[in-house]
Image: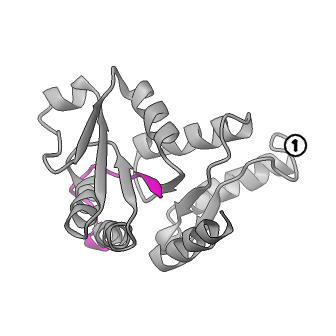
Amino acid sequence: MKIAVYCSAKDAINEEYLRLGDELGAWIGHDGHTLVYGGATGGLMSRVSAAAKSSGAYVIGVIPPKIIKMGRQADHCDELVMVADMAERKRVIREMADCCVCLPGGYGTLDEMFDVIGSGTVGEHNKPLFIVNYGGIYDGIKDVAGRMQQLGFIPTPENYSPIFVSDIAELTDKIIKIQTKR
């Protein structure tokens, strides 16, 4: 299975979040999956991709020239897909993946998360999106979505919705269950 991972590229984050990247990357490799990610270095991106690679995963990086010019291109990708810009990067990663995972991150991760949700909502795909709500980092998003649903902005039931999980163990369990249904 090709698993897209969206996450922080910042190094100055708490070690417990970085360990999430190690744990997810190791599972991706040990379970024989392919990692599809932004192809850059730093923070969770480095930790997920390095752990995936060292655990035997095939690693696909999708990267625009802007990131390369910043000197942030990862050197351990098995395949590097060059794209024109960040918008194309999001689209290509989403299209390559069988499922998507959001680990903790900043504005870029939120952008990628909402791109997957928005495109799923209009029927461009039906790929599961798992949001790892470790330590409640994404509770605010759950609250806003609930409020928007109460006000009628998000239909009930939703035709596409993300799957919130609390940790990597719950995430991997749900991915395995989806795999066995296919």
The type of residue carrying mark 1 is Gly
Residue at left offset 42%, top offset 59%: 104
Magenta residues (range): 1-16
Residue at left offset 31%, top offset 46%: 60
Quadrant of the image occupied by residue 117: top right
- 12 in the magenta segment: yes
* Image position, residue 129 (x, y; %): 59, 54
Determine whether 23 is above or below 34 in the image.
Answer: below
Determine whether 173 is above or below 123 in the image.
Answer: below
Residue density around tag 1, few if under 14, some if 14–19, many if 20 or more, within 10 Å: few
Decide if residue 179 is in sight here: yes
Residue at left offset 67%, top offset 41%: 120
Residue marked by disc 1: 152
Q: Is residue 99 left or right of residue 74?
A: right
Q: Residue furthest top?
A: 84
Instruction: In this rendered view, identify the residue nearer to me: 78 or 84.
Output: 78
* Image position, residue 102 (x, y; %): 48, 55
Determine whether 65 is above or below 59 in the image.
Answer: above
Quadrant of the image occupied by residue 170: bottom right
Instruction: In this rendered view, identify the residue nearer to me: 78 or 16.
Output: 78
Residue at left offset 29%, top offset 42%: 61
Determine whether 100 is above or below 50 in the image.
Answer: above
* Image position, residue 65 (x, y; %): 23, 24
Which quadrant of the figure contains the C terminus?
bottom right
